[in-house]
Image: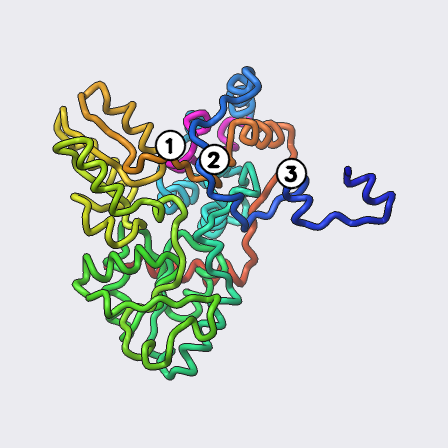
Amino acid sequence: MTTAQAQELDVQPTPLALLLLGREADPRSERGVECPGDLPSPSDPDLVARARAAKEKLGDKVFVLGHHYQRDEVIQFADVTGDSFKLARDAAARPEAEYIVFCGVHFMAESADILTSDDQKVVLPDLAAGCSMADMATAEQVAECWDVLTEAGIADRVVPVSYMNSSADIKAFTGRHGGTICTSSNAERALNWAFEQGEKVLFLPDQHLGRNTAVRDLGMSLEDCVVYNPHKPNGGLTAEQLRDAKMILWRGHCSVHGRFSLESVEDVRARIPGVNVLVHPECRHEVVAAADLVGSTEYIIKALEAAPAGSKWAIGTELNLVRRLANRFAPEGKEIVFLDRTVCFCSTMNRIDLPHLVWALESLAEGTLVNRIEVDEETEAFAKLALERMLALP
C-alpha cells in the first residue's frame, strides 16, 4: 500500500512502516548491524562524472569531508579525510566554504555544525546515517543517571567525560556538568584531567574505551569500574557500588569493534605466524589485552606507515579502512588483513553511498539546501564548552 492509498483509506502508516519502506528517515537510528560482505557497485555508471561536475560547479562554496570508514567510491570526492574530530576542526578552518558536506554519521555532522560559523551549512547526504553507539545514550537516560548519582550522594564528586562519538545532547550535558569530551587519541589525558577535578568519572557512551583507558593507561583495576545499564532500575547498581567505583561506565559499545573477540586474536595468530595484532581501543578489554598494539584510527594509519616491509598485520577496526590500507601498503610488501574472519562494515557509515552524495551535491549546485544538520543554540553553547575544555587539555 502506498502512502497515497493509505491516506485515501484514512489509514496512517506508522513511522516504522515508512522507515522500512524507505519513505522516511530517522537521523538518530541505526539501520541494523548486519555484515553484508562485499558492497554493491553504484547502479548508475555516470554517477562519478555527475559528482565531479556538481562539485566543480560549486567550487570553493563546498567542502567535502570524508571519514576513514567511508566507501572508496565516496572517499575519492573528499577534500580531506580523517577521524570525526579532525574533520570537524578542518571544517571550522574553512570559513569561506558555504556548504560542509559531511560524509560520515549524524553525530559527526552535529560536531561540525557546533564548531563552524553560523554562516556555514552542514549537510549529511543521508539522514539515516546514525551511530548505534551514540544512540545508546539519550539525554533523558543520562539525566536519569545523574539523578541516581545524586541520590547516592556522589554527583558532586563525579566528572562526566563523553566520547566524541556521542550526540550533541550528550556533549551539552557534559558541558553543563563541568566535564569534557575526549577522542580515542586523548582519552588518557581527558581522564587524568577529570580526576584532577573530582574523585569519579562518568564515562559516556562507550564502556570499552573508558575501561581500556582506565585499566591499560591509568593503571586502575577492573574492580574500579562498574557498568551503568540505563535499561535497569538505578542502572543495575547499588548505591554502595557507585560509591566504591572510580569509573562509572555507560553500557554502550561500537557494533563493529565490539564484535572482535579473543578467539579472533588467537585464530589470526594461528593462521598467520608472526602477525602483529593492532586494534582500536573501542574493542573489548580482553581483545585489547591480547593485542600487540592499541590505538586510534590515526594511530593505526601511522603505525602501518612506519611498519617495515614484509611485516604482517591483523587490524581490528572497520573494514573499509582496513581494505584501503591493505591496498595502499601492498606494494611495500606489507600484509594487512581484517582481524575477524567475518567481514563487517559499519552499516550506518555505508549509508553514505555515491547516489546520496551525488543527490546532495547536485541539489546544492542547483541552489537547493538539503539534509541540513543544525544544533539549537543552547545545546550548541554547552556542547561547545565541553569541546573547548578538551582543546585546552594539557
Query: Is residue 96 in view?
Result: no
Q: CA distance from mark 1 to mark 3?
A: 25 Å
The image shows residue 207 at horizontal and vertical percentages of: 34, 59
Mark 1 or mark 2, earlier in chain:
1
Q: Amino acid at mark 3?
A: Gly
Q: Are marks 2 and 3 in contact (CB under 8 Å)?
A: no
The image shows residue 102 at horizontal and vertical percentages of: 48, 39
The image shows residue 61 at horizontal and vertical percentages of: 52, 32
Question: Residue drawn 41% across and 62% down?
Answer: 385
Residue marked by disc 1: 320
Q: What is the crowding at mark 2: few (fewer than 14 residues within 10 Å), some, or many (at least 20)?
A: many
Residue 69 in the magenta stretch? The answer is: yes
Which mark identifies residue 227?
Answer: none
Q: Which residues are magenta?
A: 58-74
Mark 1 or mark 3, earlier in chain:
3
118 or 134, which lies in front?
Answer: 134
Mark 2 or mark 3, earlier in chain:
3
Q: Are marks 1 and 2 in contact (CB under 8 Å)?
A: yes
Which mark identifies residue 350?
Answer: 2
Q: What is the crowding at mark 1: few (fewer than 14 residues within 10 Å), some, or many (at least 20)?
A: many
Which mark identifies residue 22?
Answer: 3
Query: Is residue 268 in view?
Result: yes
| Residue 366 vertical position relative to residue 195 in the rendered view, above or below | above
Question: Residue drawn 29% across and 52% down?
Answer: 284
Residue 374 in the magenta stretch? The answer is: no
Quadrant where the image shows the N terminus? top right
